[in-house]
Amino acid sequence: MKFITAFMLATGLMAAGSAQSADMPEAAKKNNCVVCHAIDKKVVGPAWAEVARKYKGDAGAAARLSTKIAKGGSGVWGAVPMPPNPKVSDSDMKVLVDFILKLAN
Ligand code: HEC
């Protein structure tokens, strides 16, 4: 977990000054997604608008992304891993995945 703390320290200042988090859903703030993600720019993780474009038209994307967010992982956007987010409730997960995938519209 040490490396995650380092990321948060490194990106915390950037994220704190970002107006982007204002546009993020409450569930993203509550679950700390905003520490690493913004809507239209890369922070630690990919911009959510980029994620939406990548999976546009992919009917299995919502289910796969829910699992990925809960379990974490790396290799899709680069070598930096997303840590697991096991505390996200089912309803928050649905809100988040819907929100992300709709950004491509
Ligand atoms: C510590 C930083 C961090 C946090 C916190 C974080 N992410 Fe990520 N996220 C990443 C990184 C890094 C990646 C890229 C992983 C990869 O390349 O496979 C990523 C990837 C993603 C992806 C794309 C996955 C894929 O396979 O294409 C989604 C969707 C996502 N995050 C959503 C979330 C949501 C929702 C939350 C909050 C519950 C969250 N993230 C919290 C760092 C983070």
Image (cartoon, rainbow, N blue to C red):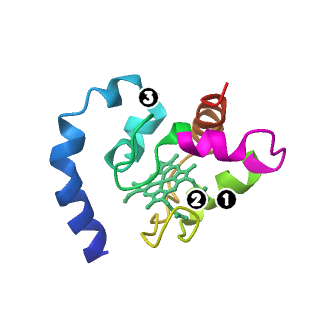
Note whether ligand 1 is within 8 Å of mark 1.
Answer: no
Compared with 42, 92 (above or below) is above
Nearer to me, 20 or 31: 20
Residue drawn at x 80%, y 45% as measured from the top left: 58
Secondary structure under the numbered disc 1 in the rendered image: helix
Q: Position of residue 72 (x, y in %)?
A: 53, 65
Q: Is mark 2 within 8 Å of ligand 1?
A: no
Proximity of marks 1 and 2: CB atoms separated by less than 8 Å? yes
Q: Is residue 18 above or below residue 70?
A: above
Across and down, in percent, residue 50 comes to 55, 42
Residue denoted by label 1: 67
State the residue position of label 3: 26
Q: Earlier in the sequence, mark 2 or mark 3?
A: 3
Distance from disc 3 to disc 1, alpha carbons, whole Å, reads 20 Å
* Other residues around mark 3 within 10 Å, as few (<14) / some (14–19) / many (≥20): some
Q: Where's the N terminus, which quadrant?
A: bottom left
Which amino acid type is marked by label 2?
Ala
- Location of mark 2 (residue): 70
Does 62 appear above or below 45?
Answer: above
Q: Secondary structure at mark 2?
A: helix
Spatial CA distance of label 1 from label 2 is: 5 Å
Q: Which residues are magenta?
A: 50-61
- Helix or strand or loop: what does disc 3 sit on? helix
- Residue 15 on the magenta span: no
Residue type highlighted by circle 1:
Thr
Residue at 27 percent across and 26 percent down: it is 19
**Label 2 to label 3: alpha-carbon separation:** 18 Å
- Residue 57's label in the rendered image is none
Q: Amino acid at mark 3?
A: Glu
On the image, the x and y values in percent for residue 97 come to: 63, 40
Disc 1 packing (10 Å; few <14; some 14–19; many ≥20): some
